[in-house]
Amino acid sequence: MSSVAELSAESEEVNPFGKPPQDLPRWAEPMLNEQPGLKIEPVNLAERAERVRFLDVADAINRNDPNFIAPLRMERMRFLDTAKNPALSELTIQPFIATRGGRLVGRITAHVDRAYNAYHSCALGWFGFFESIDDLDVAHALLDAAVRWVKAQGMTQIIGPNNFTTNHQVGMLVENFSRPAVVEMTYNPSYYERLVTSYGFGRAKDLLAYWIDVSRGLEDPKIKRFHQVSEKAKQRSGLCMRGANMKDFDAEVARLFGLYNETWQKNWGFVPVGEAEFKGIARDLKQIIVPELVLIAEDKAGRPVGFSVTLPNVNEIMPKNGRLFPFGWWPLVTGMKRIKTARLFTLGVAPGFRRRGLEAMFCIETALTANRLGFTSGEIGWTLEDNVLINRAAESFGARLDRRYRLFGLELAE
């Protein structure tokens, strides 16, 4: 499953990620000791057996962690297939696997996003899909392979983890490891931060996730107050808000495609999304969408001027090993109505309609609709650490900061 985008700032003042941070530590080009039995092997994602082995690494490392839920195996196999995934068409990717004595002990990807670098006029490389046992030798060897590969492509900086763009899973969890990730968010052991920083990476960007309880609905004073503000904004704006029409799904996706690129163009990490990729993302999400939780705001002429998508947290019922067969499909078929948490996955407003209360309308309509459908709580995120407008709004709405995800970076220039 791919994500359309993360929570938008809805502000002209957002500090865009046009050029990567300028205060990253410089790569020290460490001299790694040869470790007996440790091998770093390149992976060819075009080969099915290689993709299977790459995915097996995460299972081998995390299977005993009670909070680890493996991504759906069949979806990950399709996502990593560079010949079939339009989202990867502008990427040059090199994955690596670490083995010791024949045992899988780590993995990483290094990649260059040509569209990103062209759009932002930079020479940035990325790493992603990082997994490692708690061993500095293993982790440093993997990071070194990624850094050297990116540097060989002529890049002057590397940032990660990013799997593979900001439309996908981004960031390493660095605060609150007490529960599994919600849908399309990352989870990792707490020692990963130490492995990455000990190599020399510094903090490039923090992403925040908020948690909100909607179980009381309008009986919650903060939600009630927000509802009153929203109703006044609705009367002033003349806008109407509706849920998604799943019977006209393709047309709905087409209506939102242009709005998406218009809405997120000033945000950190943004690159215009092609129509094929956008349709592919929507197709993947269709399997779990709750139509009432996909909200579209329209002006008097019926033109969409904003939208939000809240997803049921299918991780509540996902088979822990990510495999549907032979028995994993049954909980998914029978369990959707048992899901009690959700994630506000994306919220965007066209530039000409911001700061008119539309953001509050989306938030309160989402909270009250989720409550009516039987959801009790959920996650808002991610948001940017420096997105003061949205973060303050979330807190005033009753949400609390729950988790922090971090991107790490290195300067590679001579």
Image (cartoon, helix red, strand yellow):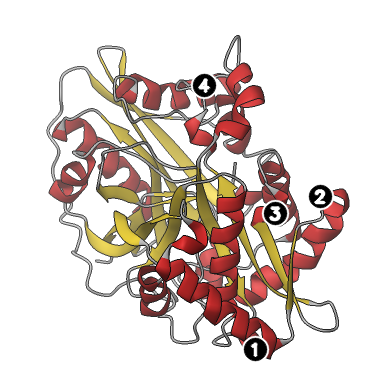
Mark 3: secondary structure: helix
Is residue 157 positioned above or below 279 on the image? below
User: How many neighbours does mark 2 have within 10 angstroms: few (below 14), some (14-19), or many (20 or more)?
Assistant: few
Labels 1 & 2 near each other (Cβ < 8 A): no
Foreground label between 3 and 1: 3
- Residue beneath disc 4: 52
How many badges with numbers are in the image?
Answer: 4
Which badge, 4 or 3, is on the more N-terminal residue?
4
Which badge, 2 or 3, is on the more N-terminal residue?
2
Labels 4 & 2 near each other (Cβ < 8 A): no
Residue 321 in picture, x, y percent from top left: 46, 20
Foreground label between 2 and 3: 3
- Residue beneath disc 2: 246
Q: Residue at x 67, y 57 (%)?
A: 294
Which badge, 3 or 1, is on the more N-terminal residue?
3
Residue type highlighted by circle 1: Gly
Labels 3 & 1 near each other (Cβ < 8 A): no
Q: Residue at x 44, y 72 (%)?
A: 122
Foreground label between 1 and 2: 2
The Cα–Cα distance between marks 4 and 2, rounded to whole angstroms, is 34 Å
Residue type highlighted by circle 4: Val
Labels 4 & 3 near each other (Cβ < 8 A): no
Is residue 26 positioned above or below 285 on the image? below
Residue type highlighted by circle 2: Met
Mark 4: secondary structure: helix
- Residue beneath disc 3: 292
Residue 198 in picture, x, y percent from top left: 13, 47
